[in-house]
Image (cartoon, coloured by chain):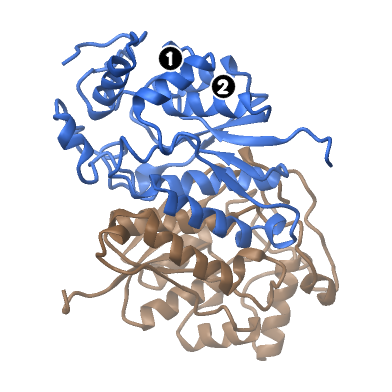
Chain colours: A brown, B blue
Amino acid sequence: MADKVRSAVVLVSGGLDSATTLAVARHQGLVCHALTVRYGQRHAAELEAARRVARSLGAVRHVEVAVDLRAIGGSALTADIDVPKDRPHEAIAEGIPVTYVPARNTVFLSLALAYAEAHEMFDIFLGVNALDYSGYPDCRPEFIHQFERLAQVATKAGVEGRGTFRVHTPLIAMTKREIILEGTRLGVDFGWTHSCYDPLPDGTACGRCDSCRLRLKGFAEAGLIDPIRYAIQT
Amino acid sequence: MADKVRSAVVLVSGGLDSATTLAVARHQGLVCHALTVRYGQRHAAELEAARRVARSLGAVRHVEVAVDLRAIGGSALTADIDVPKDRPHEAIAEGIPVTYVPARNTVFLSLALAYAEAHEMFDIFLGVNALDYSGYPDCRPEFIHQFERLAQVATKAGVEGRGTFRVHTPLIAMTKREIILEGTRLGVDFGWTHSCYDPLPDGTACGRCDSCRLRLKGFAEAGLIDPIRYAIQT
């Protein structure tokens, strides 16, 4: 067992954060299985980005699990609620946005846990970030630690003591600027990634939603050019 | 708020346990939303049973959420592993069976939590039972309590203190016999339900898998006749 190469499941959305997370896990020498949850997004650009990211960063396997969160409703990302545009950065940082998907990271981590257990892994990587999105309850360390405790009692592997489940969140305390610099250092081409909540039909980022605005601000602060195309930059 | 009728989300699989659980929740005066997770079962009989149960026991809404656990693998219920037959009751009670779906109740509860939060509910009912299936780690009170703690820190509603999430498991300490007696007392017609892991193409229960054997034993001990049809009763 001591010689066995460690494997991990990495949640890959196709965004900038999860791409950097996969790069971090690969840099640590882990054999990575990329897991993308298809949850009824309103556009396919994110899924194509996830495939590019997984392939380009050397995941040994890329698994897509479909879960129809539209049946559940309650978010601008899955239901018929308008994505806010052109909000000032102070507004983005405050409160919980309408793009919050109820219990999303709980659902994502539970699927990652199922995959990990089915393939005898104990390491899960998730690209959450507590600074830029202070508003999401399921991006906080307290949530992550509670999920680790749950994983241990929820599974055959945990109860039988075959290992200790860990949820790794290497970006949790980083700013968007730091994530972009770290990803660049580890060889991520951010041209593969997709972040926009409301892209044009051809996949071009809108440049105006909270996600585009945080991304553009991060690149500006890192002193780098964002390689993706935008419809407009405000 | 004091006058508001309390609503709950009840996980309904179509089996005997979840039907009794829904009857218990209804008997407590709760407005019940039935939630069925379609997770790539190998047969449709369970889904039809879930619809019958939800309708017959007065759920105000029945929601089906599809999640493709086959992409994850690792169980006789979702992958290409044989369902064991004709096992003695002592063997059924021992260890974790191959029909264990990795992290299934974690996935189910996370979807129920997402639904509850999206619809401003705090009560979730789950028909787990720790006695007949001592082998499933995610049927134990310890798992349920950890999930309640997770729900509180995972959600906007929990973090903002709008309520306390509760996972109710009214059957957790009952024997199959007691569940059948309680369901009968509350008006459940078990002819609506479906328990078999490996039914014939027309939906007839095999009578030989662990689930059929536990069910038949429960009816025998309750002194009642199981109203469903079996291919064979061993």
Residue at image x 67%, y 48%? B117
Q: Which residue lies furthest to the bottom in this view?
A: A223
Q: What residue type is labelled 1?
A: Phe
Task: State whether residue A183 is above or below residue B58.
Answer: below
Residue at image x 22%, y 11%? B231
Task: State whether residue B117 is above or below residue B198.
Answer: below
Q: How crowded is mark 2: few (under 14 residues within 10 Å), some or many (20 or more)?
A: many
Q: What residue type is labelled 2?
A: Ala
Residue at image x 33%, y 67%? A122
Mark 2: secondary structure? helix
Q: Residues within 10 Å of mark 1 (few under 14, many from 20)?
A: many
Residue at image x 72%, y 52%? B163
Q: Mark 2 lies on which chain?
A: B
Give the image quarter of residue A70.
top right
Q: Mark 1 lies on which chain?
A: B
Q: Is residue A153 left or right of residue B6?
A: left
**Mark 1–mark 2 distance (CA, rounded to whole Å):** 13 Å
